[in-house]
Amino acid sequence: MEVIKSLEKDRSNLIKAIQMVQEEYGYISDKSIENISEYFGIPTVEVEGVLSFYAQFKRTAPGEYKIAVCDGTACHIKGSSRVKNWLVEDLGIDDGETTEDGLFSMETVACLGCCSLAPVVSINGKVYGKLDREKLLKIIDDYRNRGEN
Amino acid sequence: MIERIKVGMASCGIAAGADEVKDFLDQKLKDREDIEILEVGCIGHCYAEPLVEVETESGSVFFENVEPTEEYLDKILEIDKESTMSFRDERTGREHLKVTKLAGRIDPVSLQEYIENGGYESLKKVAKMSPDKIVEEVKTSGLRGRGGGGFPTGLKWSFLASKEADKKILICNADEGDPGAFMDRSMMESVPHQVIEGMLIAALATGSNELFIYARAEYPLAVKNMNIAIEQVYDSDINVFDGETIDVTVKEGAGAFVCGEETAMIHSLEGNRGNPRYRPPYPTDEGYKGHPTLINNVETFANVPIIFEEGGEKYAELGTENSKGTKLFALAGDLKYAGLVEVPMGLTIGEVVYDMGGAERGEVKAVQIGGPSGGCIPAKHFDVPIDYDSLESLGAIMGSGGLIVIGSGRCMVETARYFLEFTTKESCGKCTFCRIGTKRMLETLERITSGEGTLEDIDFLEDLGPKVIDASLCGLGQTAPNPVLSTLRYFKDEYLAHVEDKHCPALQCNDLVDIYLDQEICIECGQCIKNCPVDAISDDFVVDNETCTRCNTCIEVCPVDAISRVKRGDTNE
Ligand SMILES: Cc1cc2nc3c(=O)[nH]c(=O)nc-3n(C[C@H](O)[C@H](O)[C@H](O)COP(=O)(O)O)c2cc1C
Ligand code: SF4
Ligand code: SF4
Ligand code: SF4
Ligand code: FES
Ligand code: FES
């Protein structure tokens, strides 16, 4: 495991290691679990047990553009369920899914810390706030076209 | 003469477009060597983002909602007085900037600027004091934990200080789990050195030698700024005392709310699943890898340098009998001036919500305070002072500082359902009552919001809530029913309307609502038909409510507001 070889082989670095692998590959494959387990000398089931506990870790490949729909309190009050619906309609995928072309994936998350701009989504970490339907669909379209070019 | 131009580049500033503004200014002013352009953190006026401060020899002016255009550039360069932002007295007259006094005013990742503004002076003072004296001073200040529980900080420190051990651990709780709060993010992004200074003071007071900052996964900029600040601290030996280095490390969480709980956080840091465990033993007796461990919140640590700057007694002058100093609140929801405010303890909720936040009197139903562990306080109690005890007497808690204004158009049953859904998802599953009990409560709430609830369901919630509280091991389960119980206490009429009249008074619960197109108002533009995702609107402008998913798209696109949500069955008026 190239990406984690800078880490000290201490159990307390396990989560860090999983994060680094996900950062590199976008998700955690069975192979990655084996590699991590070998690196730390921890059984694979235990690595799986730890990673399944944390919402951040993905076991399937996400889209090229990862959309996080905020459903924190402020965004919920300001209509995050509608924001999600607009995306479901536009992309044809639901929470946790990836579009067939692999371009977009979507998940709901709790609070991106920009509550004052609610409702917000983030795409690959960039936050877009004060969304209405038109604004959101335009943002998605821009990404889509970026993909085509 | 312009000396410096500062662009507010905390996460929310960037989300509002501050990075484009900064790039534009950099580009346009690249030949102006006399003007320095600086990225700063957050001054808390989120509603005005992107926000630009222009420093001149005669003081600062601010520009709000700046766009990356020549027009704004001209205004900024001319310091066009007409266009500068005016700070409202309703806010400035009430806020008390102590903990956030440097936030958004200095370069967050400049050690030099922090020091020039008095930074690390408190640490220097403390380094000459005995540990007992340091703890004593914090006790005198009356500081209580800002992470939600409100435990006296000095007392907590004394527990760890009295332990004999080679290794003691200090953890900064930067997990900021309340979904709708951003005080800690803002502090770490804006004044990371202040948080570190507080931690180092705590380390000297308690004899700790290994320090962790456990930061929320969704906060990349906070993590980045904390890491830069830590590197500077190492480079300048600020964390070296009598030849001994105190180690400081940032650890990123991985998206589990329960890891905000102390014992769960320790398990997570050890590389395990974040399950809480029974206390005692308390972390100060047995914590991270068995070492005595103390956990404080970001804002708690950020208060510490202030205490030693002005002295514990002076610090304790501000606030109320049992709640000293200031509190940060993240104001969001149905109000005009969303943002971060720092207010003295004892201010009333009304002052914060109406005066500082600009929410309309009469348009506000309640505030939600304390997130999933907290409660809703109805507008009729807005004269209550913000302090630990008063809020608790209302069935809410101070919480960590999330303050969500709920406008009159929102449904309180749905709000309660929302929080239960959150806690059900986040329960670690160890205790039956927390795992199954919250799930049963959620199902019951879902029945009510979908119009299938009964009066027995309401009784069931009132009965099960306290049981979940009693039979849960950790704070998550012990507080999960609060949003339900507090809305039942103050908004029972809304529950009853859902159950008895099958009516959502706020017209929010989709199953109890129809979509009505008023042909008297309609100008037959066809926008609604074109945009409806499920073709629920006929060519002669009638909504088929069987097909309609209540997505609201038609309401948003109609130019003349001819379409509205009505009580289910009320479409023929
Ligand atoms: C489920 C749960 C989540 C919590 N989340 C946080 C959090 O996000 N931030 C925080 O500072 N404290 C949180 N706490 C409280 C901490 O366990 C702890 O009391 C606090 O960090 C102590 O610091 P303080 O005394 O400075 O407030 C949480 C507690 C529970 C039970
Ligand atoms: S109360 Fe809930 S979150 Fe806490 S330990 Fe029990 S099951 Fe886990
Ligand atoms: S609410 Fe949505 S589904 Fe229903 S009629 Fe309007 S656009 Fe169509
Ligand atoms: S959008 Fe409004 S005005 Fe246009 S056809 Fe629909 S109801 Fe009529
Ligand atoms: S609630 Fe959405 S950003 Fe905080
Ligand atoms: S202006 Fe900083 S939190 Fe919004």
Image (cartoon, rainbow, N blue to C red):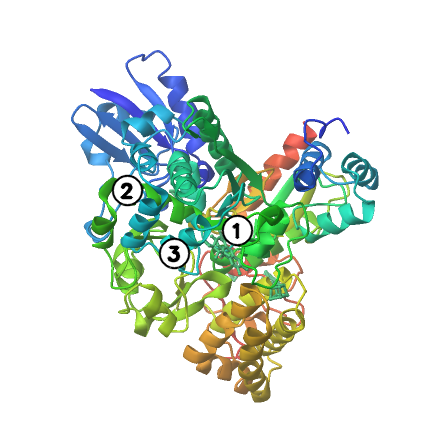
Residue B258 got which mark?
none
Q: Which residue is at 47% across, 79% downward?
A: B488
Amino acid found under the numbered disc labelled 3: Leu
- Residue extending furthest front? B164
Q: Secondary structure at mark 3?
A: helix
Give the foreground label among 3 and 2.
3
Give the foreground label among 2 and 1.
2
Q: Secondary structure at mark 2?
A: helix
Q: Residues within 10 Å of mark 1 (few under 14, many from 20)?
A: many
Amino acid found under the numbered disc labelled 1: Cys
Gap in Å between the C-alphas at discs 1 and 3? 32 Å
Are discs 3 and 2 located on one and the same chain? yes
The residue closer to the viewer here, A80 or B388, is B388
Q: Is mark 1 within 8 Å of ligand 5?
A: yes
Q: Residues within 10 Å of mark 3 (few under 14, many from 20)?
A: some
Amino acid found under the numbered disc labelled 2: Phe
Q: Which residue is at 40% across, 52% downward?
A: B158
Q: Is residue A117 left or right of residue B93?
A: right
The residue closer to the viewer here, A40 or B365, is A40
Which residue matches tag 1? A111
Which residue matches tag 3? B155
Question: Residue B51 placed where, x, y %?
Answer: 34, 36
The image quadrant where one finds the N terminus of chain A is: top right
Judging from the image, mark 1 belongs to the subunit labelled A
Q: Secondary structure at mark 1?
A: loop
Q: Earlier in the sequence, mark 3 or mark 2?
A: 3
Q: Are marks 2 and 1 in contact (CB under 8 Å)?
A: no
The image quadrant where one finds the C terminus of chain A is: top right
Which residue matches tag 2? B308
The answer to whether residue B507 is visible is: no
Judging from the image, mark 2 belongs to the subunit labelled B
